Amino acid sequence: MQRISLVREGATNMADAVESVYREKDEFCQEAKRSKPADRDGPESESENILAGFKTPNVLSDSAREKIIFIHGKIADQDAVVILEKTPIREDTLPELFSCSSLRLETRNDIYGSYRLQAPPHLNEIKTTVIYPATEKHVKKYQRQENFLVEETGEDYESITLPYIQQQSLSLQWVYNILDKKAEADRVVYEDPDPKLGFVLLPDLKWNQKQVDDLYLIAVAHQRDVRSLRDLTSEHLPLLQNIFQKGKEAILQRYNLPSSKLRVYLHYQPSYYHLHVHFTKLGYEAPGCGVERAHLLSDVIQNLQANPQFYKTRTMYFPLRADDGLLDRFREAGRM
């Protein structure tokens, strides 16, 4: 995979489609961001424009509301996926934006005027991800598709989901590189090094860190034997409480954002199977923060306090794409 820069399937409505695309995109974004290109000796030149040779573009999915588009094409006769996303407007750039941009009137009616504003190039960037060479799996991941809500009992997890997860054997080496300080050490916001209760807190790759309105951080647990919500029992309460408390304190200290303005949650299903917790600013509609996938950490803690085996036995609901192999397993088992 070749990296240019990083941003962060479809469903019957576009909001679900974009959320699902972001979810499935996470694992590939992590790889695109963190992997060194295999065919290069050094870092990519900043002036290189690999997209100059991008041919036969085909839109896989897009969203006017999210201002993001996913495109399939070819670079040097090899498949590539390009993701383009408009960057947020930052408050600290407003004076320059107003004074240095050109403005063209389109229409005026009484007190209402509509204009086209052409901002200076450095204030009009498009966040771009290039996955190249891309496999057929990448292309399918970003295509607009139907989503289906799966009902998973505790027995379903043991007999259907867990064997499927184990069979996939998706690499978590990039996670271990972070925990072992072999990669991204300069991005760490906070770390508790305790092997049982500790975690690393760092910005999610979807956040450009230029404004707190879309703040998004991930707390990655040092424990390596907890895959997801399904593995949690009351034994893990000290770990969860530690992440919850110290994560909020670190964000307050670094970003001056109190806990009352944070959404702290876990995903089920997660995009990768190593325990991690999401910290986002309340009000920011982060991909995957909907009720069918996000579980507030405060609720998780209370549920485990009331029932130590809560997530071992509870029936869970989560969305899967039409082409997801796990969905096929549920159908084969007569659960769909």
Image: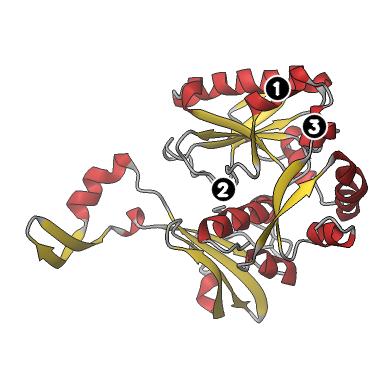
Q: Which mark is residue 311?
A: 3
- Binning the other alpha carbons within 10 Å of mark 3 as few (below 14), some (14 to 19) or many (20 upward) gives many
Q: Which mark is residue 207?
A: none
Q: Amino acid at mark 1?
A: Ile
- Between marks 1 and 3, how big is the CA–CA gap? 11 Å
- Quadrant hosting residue 264: top right
Q: Which mark is residue 287?
A: 2
| Residue at 14% in and 59% down | 113
Direction from residue 118 to residue 40 in the image, left or right: right
First reached walking from the N terminus: tag 2 or tag 1: 2
First reached walking from the N terminus: tag 1 or tag 3: 1
- Regarding residue 197, the answer to whether it shows in the image is no
Q: Tell me the mark number nearer the camera, choosing from 2 and 3.
A: 3
Secondary element at image label 3: helix
Q: Tell me the mark number nearer the camera, choosing from 2 and 1.
A: 1
Direction from residue 261 to residue 140 in the image, left or right: right
| Residue at 81% in and 50% down | 171
Q: Amino acid at mark 2?
A: Pro
Q: Nearer the viewer, residue 315 or 98?
A: 315
Residue 213: x percent and y percent? 42, 37
Taking 262 as reference, is 97 above or below it?
Answer: below
Secondary element at image label 2: loop
- The answer to whether mark 1 and mark 3 are in CB contact below 8 A is no
Residue 278: x percent and y percent? 62, 35
Secondary element at image label 1: helix
Residue 42: x percent and y percent? 65, 57
| Residue at 72% in and 64% down | 322
Give the residue pinned by disc 1. 301
Image quadrant in which the C terminus is located:
bottom right
| Residue at 31% in and 40% down | 91
- The answer to whether mark 2 and mark 3 are in CB contact below 8 A is no
